[in-house]
Amino acid sequence: MLDLDLLALAGLLLTPGPTNIVLAFSTVSSGARRTVPMLAAVVIAYMVVILAVAGPAALVPAANEAVARAVLRACAVLWLLWLAFSVWTANDDGAEARLVTVRQVFVTTLVNPKAMIVALLVQSAGMTAGLLAIIAVLVSLAGAVWIAVGMVLRRSGSSLGGRRTLRRASAICLAGFGIILAGSSL
């Protein structure tokens, strides 16, 4: 992969998306100490998607690619809408309430369209251990940036009302990603 490709990949990973929104929201609601370990789930999910695309991509007949993409897209849309609902309806009572789980971050990353784009880029560039290591570092750094965004928001002194507003805004963003993803298949 060319340096310019890696720069574009880093830019893609930094853009707001479901995983980044969930990391920032988790940091605001539960703190950085509870969110930082979630970066491992994000990296592992990206690697799972990359490796999952490697084998089947070569085996799926061209005639079945559209069906496979449609099924994956429908699963991603349903997950994002469910996660948006869960975030919207989460309880604000406890300051230490863990509103986001490692499992949610992992599954959100698995269905994140950016993970599939990264997997396809890796397939086109030729998968090597070095490239996978670089991608793991870029994914970690992008996630760390969004955790830092969450830390800034958390330290800004947002009250319970502010946290509720952020939670609702995060839910709207997640639902919006799901709707956009659903609409892109029409």
Image: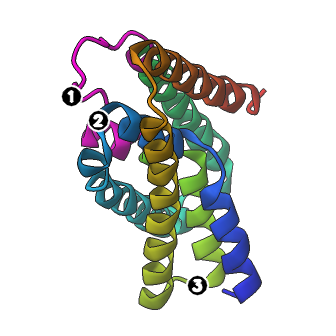
Residue range in magenta is: 86-108
Above/below status of 147 relative to 180: below
The first of marks 2 and 3 along the sequence is 2
> Tags 3 and 1 in contact by the CB under 8 Å rule?
no
Q: Is residue 24 above or below residue 170?
A: below
Residue underneath mark 1: 96
Q: Residue furthest front?
A: 157
Q: Earlier in the sequence, mark 3 or mark 1?
A: 1
Answer with left or right where residue 31 lies relative to residue 46.
left
SS type, badge 2:
helix
Between 17 and 107, the residue placed more toward the observer is: 17
Residue 179 appears in which quarter of the rendering?
A: top right
Amino acid on which disc 3 is placed: Gly
Please tell me how crowded label 2 is: few (under 14), some (14-19), or many (20+) other residues with Cα within 10 Å: many
Q: Residues within 10 Å of mark 3 (few under 14, many from 20)?
A: few
Quarter occupied by the N terminus: bottom right
Disc 2 versus disc 1: distance between alpha carbons? 6 Å
Q: Nearer the viewer, mark 3 or mark 1?
A: 1
The image quarter containing residue 117 is bottom right
Q: Position of residue 104 (x, y in %)?
A: 33, 36
Do the residues bearing badges 2 and 3 touch, measured as CB atoms within 8 Å?
A: no
Residue 126 circle label? 3
The residue that label 2 is drawn on is: 30
